[in-house]
Image (cartoon, rainbow, N blue to C red):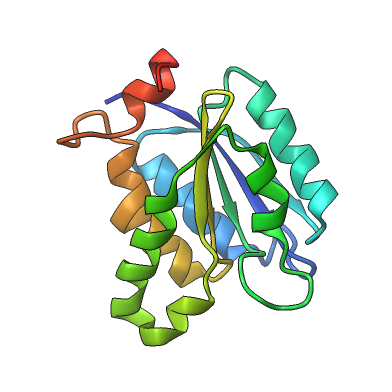
């Protein structure tokens, strides 16, 4: 098992350390899978605050993965995709598509309101998922966990992350 350093960012105007169950879900998942929590932050749903934190992490060679929860819907201040997409060197279209597919099994057509995205920036893989704890569990358990497992076949992101070749 290759241990990766994973940073978790919660985007919310209302959550704090005590009420961030979605961030807790992601941290629990990554730790149970043997990865290291590189950092964890909560920021307001503000494009520039989101970009500032993620930019620091993607500039830090020790951070392999960033998982962002929140701000992916259509409500007034939801701006995670707008904040993060310009930072990508490469988009991961399949992540959002697959997230909505597996989410459909749980919440039906409401999944179309998810703007989950993924991509690579400076050799760091970034996943942005909705802010609900259920969505975080779905994303981690059904997609992210496998892609961060070096033994998952036929392919995963570990070699791309650790070798810098992509």
Count of marks, rendered view:
0
Is 5 located above or below residue 61 in the figure?
below
Percent across and percent down for residue 82 are: 70, 55
Picture coordinates of residue 109 (x, y %)? 40, 85
Q: Quick check: 143 above or below 13?
A: above
Quadrant where the C terminus is found in the figure: top left
Taking the view exactly as shown, the residue that stands out farthest to the top is 163
Q: Residue at x 76, y 43 (%)?
A: 51
* Residue appearing at x 48%, y 58% in the figure: 25
**Residue 79 occupies quadrant:** bottom right
Residue at screen point 27% across, 44% down: 146
**In the image, 52: left or right of 136?**
right
Residue 56, percent across and down? 73, 29
Quadrant where the image shows the N terminus:
top left
Instruction: Give residue 42's position: percent from left, percent from top.
Output: 73, 52
Q: Vertical placement of 100 versus 3: above or below?
A: below
Is residue 4 left or right of 45 when viewed as pictured?
left
Q: Nearer the viewer, residue 54 or 140?
A: 54
- Tell me which residue sits at (53%, 77%) in the image: 113
Q: Quadrant of residue 76?
A: bottom right
- Nearer the observer, 25 or 10: 10
């Amino acid at each position: 098992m290759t241990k990766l350093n994973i940073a978790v960012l919660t985007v919310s105007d209302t959550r704090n350390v005590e009420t961030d169950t979605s961030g807790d879900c992601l941290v629990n998942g990554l730790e149970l899978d043997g990865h290291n929590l590189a950092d964890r932050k909560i920021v307001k749903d503000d494009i520039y605050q989101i970009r500032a934190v993620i930019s620091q992490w993607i500039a830090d060679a020790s951070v392999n993965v960033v998982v962002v929860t929140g701000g992916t819907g259509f409500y007034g201040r939801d701006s995670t995709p707008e904040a993060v997409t310009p930072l990508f060197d490469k988009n991961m279209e399949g992540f959002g598509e697959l997230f909505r597919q597996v989410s459909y099994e749980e919440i039906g057509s409401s999944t179309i309101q998810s703007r989950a995205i993924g991509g690579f920036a400076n050799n760091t893989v970034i996943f942005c998922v909705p802010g609900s704890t259920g969505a975080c569990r779905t994303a981690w358990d059904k997609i992210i966990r496998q892609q961060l497992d070096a033994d998952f076949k036929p392919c995963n992101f570990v070699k791309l992350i650790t070798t810098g070749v992509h």
